[in-house]
Amino acid sequence: MGLLNKVSKWRQKARTYQSFILVLTLTLSSAGLAASSKKSWQNTPTPEDWSSFFESSDKDRLKTWDHIKTYGLTFEDLSWEWRLGWVRACTAASSKVCSDIMQLGLFDKALVVRAEAATRLGQRFAGTGHPPALRLLKTAYAVQQNSRSKEPLFVQYRILSALNQIGGEGSAIGKQLSMNSQRMNNYWTRIASK
């Protein structure tokens, strides 16, 4: 009887251990965790992290986002490369998380993230005349960090391009915004005529 109890307890421990490993493995793989520690989201991603992130599904990335939040991190806390990656990954996704990420990206502290968000909004809403996207882009165009010494930075070009791509009222908004700079007016004239 003693040996049977020991075997039974050993099997129970083995099943518990196997279940733990299975749950851990499924959590890590199905959540698409490209990086599993708080610090790794704040550092430059490795090529393996980057590849894993973009190969994961939208559903897995949402699980990953929930996992990131368990660390107490926000979008702004991530490295600029990860913020850029999230903006790219959210281009075609329609979740609330991705809508928030696209908006945060458009007003990000990193110029390259803001420019990417503008481009991706243009792609996401191309030909729709989507009013909320147009309002966001119009607001972002006026952000002081998008120009230097009254000269436009490349993000403003991207915003005009996105407005043109979205269409609808975007054409009127783009024309109005471009009037403040000869460079921007020339650029708008060139892209609006295509």
Image (cartoon, grey):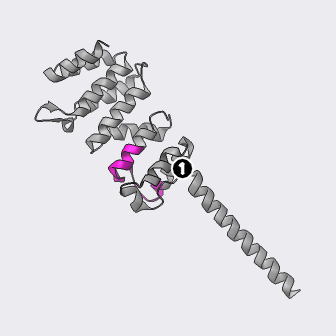
Viewer can see residue 107: no
Q: Residue at x 20, y 34 (%)?
A: 153
| The magenta stretch spans residue 70 | yes
Is 45 rendered above or below residue 114? below
Q: Residue furthest right?
A: 1
Residue 137 spot, x, y in % from top left: 31, 29
In what element is the residue under mark 1?
A: helix
Q: Residue at x 10, y 35 (%)?
A: 149
Crowding at mark 1 (Cα within 10 Å: few <14, some 14-19, many 20+): some
Magenta segment, prevailing SS (helix, strand or loop)? helix
> Which residue type does callout 1 highlight?
Lys
| The magenta stretch spans residue 36 | no
Image quarter (top left, top right, bottom left or bottom right) of the C terminus: top left
Viewer can see residue 32: yes
Q: Residue at x 44, y 36 (%)?
A: 99
Q: Disc 1 marks which residue?
A: 63
Is 59 rendered above or below residue 23? above
Horizontal side of 59 relative to 18 (left or right) equals left
Image quarter (top left, top right, bottom left or bottom right) of the N terminus: bottom right
Q: Residue furthest top?
A: 193
Horizontal side of 130 relative to 160 (left or right) equals right
Residue 25 spot, x, y in % from top left: 61, 60
What range is drawn magenta here?
A: 68-85
Residue 12 spot, x, y in % from top left: 76, 73
Residue 113 spot, x, y in % from top left: 32, 41
In the picture, residue 103 is in which quadrant?
A: top left
Residue situated in front as seen by the camera: 152 or 77: 152
Is 74 rendered above or below residue 148? below
In the picture, residue 29 is in which quadrant?
A: bottom right
